Image (spheres, rainbow, N blue to C red):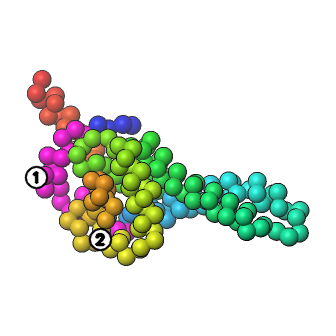
């Protein structure tokens, strides 16, 4: 179900959303754990042809083949987050289960630029420098370092639904 939440930036500007409206560290971490489990299953399926090929070879995997598996795993990891976030309107399977969603602070649909920056470059940086995740705890909108760069925020799904329904009521009242 697609929700076009026009005017959400007005709500963010007015600071009308209480702090509990935003997805905090632990709920985001739980969503990531769920996503990581799903990605691991997809990776195992993607790696199967290489493992089957080398099953009969006594030498095992060579360094170049291990590099191929590592590259394939990275592609699966990043594509999962990029495609799920963009094509599923800000949600991966883990975020769906945890009832959270990534939204643009401007109220528009997430752009490919926002998604790629957030899910590829940002995820790589934050996975490399884990301490950057602590920013979520101290940010007023519980944004990560990358959320701030990409102008995104993680909201609880019921808040997104409330904002959408509020905007629909405003539009209906205008007519």
Q: Quadrant of the N terminus?
A: top left
Element under label 2?
A: helix
Compare residues 140 and 65 and report the one nearer the observer.
Answer: 65
Residues packed near mark 2 inside 10 Å, few (<14), some (14 to 19) or many (20 plus)? some
Q: Splitting the image into 4 quarters, where does residue 132 fall?
A: bottom left
Against 21, is 1 above or below?
A: above
Residue 175 seen in render? yes
Compare residues 44 and 37 and report the one nearer the observer.
Answer: 44
Q: Splitting the image into 4 quarters, where does residue 5 fall?
A: top left
Write down the region rendered in magenta: 5-26
Q: Quadrant of the C terminus?
A: top left
Compare residues 63 and 168 and report the one nearer the observer.
Answer: 63
Residue at 54 percent of width and 57 percent of height: 77
* Cβ atoms under marks 1 and 2 closer than 8 Å: no
Residue at 41 percent of width and 73 percent of height: 129
Across and down, in percent, residue 65 comes to: 73, 62
Residue at 10 percent of width and 52 percent of height: 14
Against 79, is 146 above or below?
A: below
Across and down, in percent, residue 166 comes to: 19, 40
Residue 29 seen in render? no
The residue carrying mark 1 is 14
Query: In the visual, does 97 lie left or right of 172?
Result: right
Q: Splitting the image into 4 quarters, where does residue 66 fall?
A: bottom right
Across and down, in percent, residue 112 comes to: 39, 44
The residue carrying mark 2 is 135
In this view, which residue lies farthest toward the bottom?
Answer: 131
State the separation of the CA atoms marked 1 and 2. 22 Å
Q: Is residue 25 magenta?
A: yes
Against 161, is 121 above or below?
A: below
Element under label 1?
A: helix
């Amino acid at each position: 179900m697609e929700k076009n939440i026009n005017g959400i930036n007005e709500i963010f500007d007015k600071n009308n959303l209480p702090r509990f409206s935003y997805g905090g560290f632990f709920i985001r971490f739980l969503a990531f754990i769920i996503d990581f489990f799903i990605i691991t299953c997809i990776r195992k399926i993607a790696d199967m042809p290489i493992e089957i090929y080398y099953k009969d070879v006594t030498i095992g995997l060579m360094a170049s083949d291990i590099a191929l598996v590592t590259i394939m795993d990275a592609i699966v990891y990043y594509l999962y987050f990029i495609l799920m976030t963009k094509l599923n309107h800000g949600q991966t399977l883990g975020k769906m289960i945890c009832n959270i969603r990534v939204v643009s602070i401007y109220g528009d649909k997430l752009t490919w630029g926002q998604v790629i920056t957030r899910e590829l470059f940002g995820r790589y940086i934050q996975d490399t420098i884990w301490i950057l995740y602590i920013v979520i705890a101290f940010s007023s909108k519980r944004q990560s370092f990358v959320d701030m760069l990409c102008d995104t925020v993680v909201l609880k799904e019921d808040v997104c639904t409330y904002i959408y329904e509020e905007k629909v009521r405003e539009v209906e009242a205008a007519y």
